[in-house]
Image: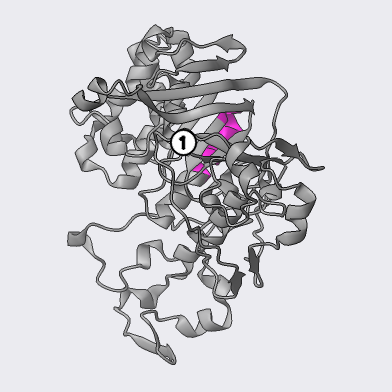
């Protein structure tokens, strides 16, 4: 239980402050359960007596625990924490070089008209999945992109990688403008830009072994020989904490976490300048999620990659990202450094997102903000603020009829809102407060 709690990123915690403690090892196969405590192979407190199956001890009122050493843990809870694999202090460095620049990006999808609509001469309608988005990422930087389902996160990422053609705007990688379609991009460009998809089931070829999939980018994009590619694959598997024996396995023989590690390894194979990770941990349990987040951090530190990390979970994004962009109905609402995003003033949409996240701490206090009103239809033409139909701080006609200005505070936080920042700051309080923060780790990361 302590391992699961330590695996969960908490709001306000960043990779520069703490390291997530994933549970070591893996769950044993059902046919190979240990005779004693079934957690013995993964427990940091396992001793000889743990080879005997423990009883279910009552450790408090309505509280039971199946552990021989529960009295020791009760006196010193930190004894049950999982070990941290690395001990050295790691420094996160960002460089001035701009890796990705997106200007005025639009991705519209036409809606097919019915016969009656054609006869009535109704004009064609469009779904504005991404509308006038500007963002940039520097080398060594992680940018988090958050928003509700349907907000345009995945469409934006697919437009950057070339799987969905943009309607308008510019996408530049390392100063070079990219063609809209992936089919028109050179192999060199493909080697600089890689993507990890949300569902590894769909990203991995079920008929190819892990070794064949990982060798492929080395052979097709980097022109290495078979022997050189084989050596690189072994190093890559070691980097994602998988043994060389996995080279001979098919995806069906892997767990969900192992499949995602293979997908991440394949994305890092060509040492891309930009890695796009589209909700890579949303379907994983919290311990595997922690291992994957640590893995992305370690590989980024080693290779100085830039990362566009997409998620609906602000706690996960807040842990991994240096900056965070909040998107709603295809438009950016707020862009800020991670530490600043969690401090007022907030965009009203960001304020609502923060208040809706469950906190893994019984001592935490949280203000609840319920969004009312209807979500606009994808084909609706929005003139003013796209959030005005649900905004708890709605001002009136100005929000309906006029586009909001981009306001910038003294910390560089950008907010797309009519309400003056000072007024927002006065009206808002921190939407969450943790009274008992997680004890600091010996392994510290400094920015």
Image vertical order of residue 100 relative to residue 263, above or below: above
Left or right of 221? Residue 10 is right
Left or right of 192? Residue 51 is left
Quadrant occupied by the C terminus:
top right
Quadrant occupied by the N terminus:
bottom left
Pick the residue in front: 28 or 276. Answer: 276
Q: Position of residue 272 (x, y in %)?
A: 51, 22
Residue 369 in view (yes/no) = yes
* Residue at position x 33%, y 85% in the image: 56
In reply to whether residue 380 is colored magenta, the answer given is no
Q: Residue furthest front?
A: 120
The range drawn in magenta is: 294-306
Pick the residue in front: 349 or 258. Answer: 349
In reply to whether residue 295 is colored magenta, the answer given is yes
Which secondary structure type mostly characterizes the magenta part of the structure?
Answer: helix
Image vertical order of residue 356 relative to residue 290, above or below: below
Q: Position of residue 68 (x, y in %)?
A: 40, 81
Q: Residue furthest right?
A: 410
Name the element at disc 1.
helix
Q: Position of residue 155 (x, y in %)?
A: 42, 30
Image vertical order of residue 29 relative to residue 117, above or below: below
Q: Residues within 10 Å of mark 1 (few under 14, many from 20)?
A: many
Quadrant hosting residue 124: top left
Mark 1 highlights which residue?
A: 153
């Amino acid at each position: 239980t302590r391992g699961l709690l330590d695996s969960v990123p908490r709001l306000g915690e960043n990779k520069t402050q703490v390291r997530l403690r994933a549970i070591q090892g893996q769950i044993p196969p059902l046919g190979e359960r240990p005779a004693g405590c079934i957690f013995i192979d993964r427990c940091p407190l396992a001793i000889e007596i743990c080879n005997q199956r423990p009883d279910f001890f009552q450790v408090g009122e309505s509280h039971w625990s199946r552990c021989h050493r529960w009295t020791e843990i009760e006196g010193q809870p930190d004894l049950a924490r999982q070990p941290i694999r690395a001990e050295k202090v790691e420094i996160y460095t960002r460089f001035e070089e701009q890796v990705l620049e997106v200007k005025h990006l639009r991705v519209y999808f036409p809606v097919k008209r019915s016969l009656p609509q054609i006869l009535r001469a109704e004009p064609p309608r469009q779904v504005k999945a991404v509308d006038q988005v500007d963002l940039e990422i520097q080398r060594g930087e992680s940018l988090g992109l958050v928003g509700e389902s349907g907000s345009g996160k995945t469409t934006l990422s697919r437009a950057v990688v070339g799987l969905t053609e943009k309607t308008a705007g510019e996408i530049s990688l390392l100063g070079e403008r990219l063609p809209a379609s992936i089919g028109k991009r050179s192999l060199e460009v493909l080697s600089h830009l890689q993507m990890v998809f949300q569902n590894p089931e769909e990203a991995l070829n079920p008929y190819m072994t892990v070794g064949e999939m990982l060798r492929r980018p080395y052979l097709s994009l980097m022109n290495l020989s078979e022997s050189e590619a084989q050596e690189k694959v072994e190093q890559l598997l070691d980097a994602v904490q998988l043994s060389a024996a996995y080279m001979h396995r098919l995806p069906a023989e892997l767990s969900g976490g192992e499949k995602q590690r293979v997908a991440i390894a394949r994305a890092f194979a060509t040492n891309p300048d930009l890695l796009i990770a589209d909700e890579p941990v949303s379907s994983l349990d919290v311990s595997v999620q922690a291992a994957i987040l640590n893995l992305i951090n370690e590989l980024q530190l080693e290779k100085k990659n830039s990362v566009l990390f997409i998620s609906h979970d602000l706690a996960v994004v807040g842990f991994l990202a240096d900056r965070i962009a909040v998107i709603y109905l295809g438009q950016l609402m707020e862009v800020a450094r991670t530490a600043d995003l969690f401090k007022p003033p907030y965009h009203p949409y960001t304020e609502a997102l923060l208040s809706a996240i469950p906190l893994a701490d019984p001592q935490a206090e949280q203000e609840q903000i319920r969004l009312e009103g209807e979500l606009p239809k994808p084909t609706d033409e929005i003139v003013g603020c796209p959030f005005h139909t649900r905004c708890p701080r709605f001002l009136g006609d100005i929000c309906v009829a006029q586009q909001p200005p981009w306001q910038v505070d003294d910390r560089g936080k950008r907010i797309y809102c009519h309400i003056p920042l000072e007024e927002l700051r006065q009206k808002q309080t921190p939407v969450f407060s943790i009274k008992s923060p997680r004890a600091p780790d010996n392994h510290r990361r400094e920015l």
